């Protein structure tokens, strides 16, 4: 993750402060319908895992078909 602050929205010369290596964010899909988000942000003292699930099934069939290849 990179933390940014400052700047002006839609500006050609944004004055943005960037803090690189702020933390990590990993998205892992266990199948076409669910997965987890793992995060670790040491500077904020935050770490954990959040389960996620598909809420719209519009591309689920395509995802499943691609797994069979």
Image (cartoon, rainbow, N blue to C red):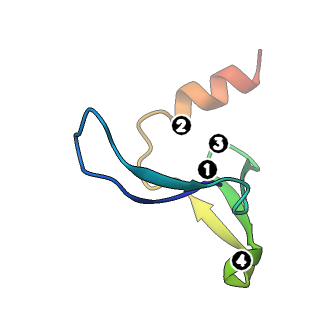
Q: Would you say the residues marked 1 and 3 are in contact, meaning their CB atoms lie under 8 Å apart?
A: yes
- Asked which quadrant contains residue 25, the reply is bottom right
Report, in whole angstroms, how far the alpha carbon at label 2 lies from the one at label 4.
37 Å
Q: In the picture shown, does residue 57 fall above or below 61?
A: below
Report, in whole angstroms, how far the alpha carbon at label 3 lies from the one at label 4.
33 Å
Residue 33 image offset from top left, x and y in percent = 61, 50
Identify residue for label 1.
Answer: 33
Dot in front, 2 or 4: 4
Report, in whole angstroms, how far the alpha carbon at label 2 lies from the one at label 3.
6 Å
Residue located at (73% from left, 55% from top): 21
Q: In the picture shown, does residue 20 fall above or below 64?
A: below
Q: Earlier in the sequence, mark 2 or mark 4?
A: 4
Identify residue for label 3.
Answer: 32
Q: Would you say the residues marked 1 and 2 are in contact, meaning their CB atoms lie under 8 Å apart?
A: yes
Is 57 situated left or right of 61 in this image? Answer: left
Residue 1 image offset from top left, x and y in percent = 65, 55
Residue located at (26% from left, 32% from top): 12
């Amino acid at each position: 993750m990179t933390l940014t602050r400052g700047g002006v929205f839609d500006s050609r010369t944004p004055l943005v402060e960037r803090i690189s290596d702020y933390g990590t964010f990993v998205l892992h899909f266990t199948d076409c319908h669910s997965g987890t988000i793992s995060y670790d942000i040491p500077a904020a003292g935050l770490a954990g895992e959040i389960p996620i699930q598909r809420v719209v099934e519009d591309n689920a069939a395509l995802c499943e078909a691609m797994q069979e290849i």
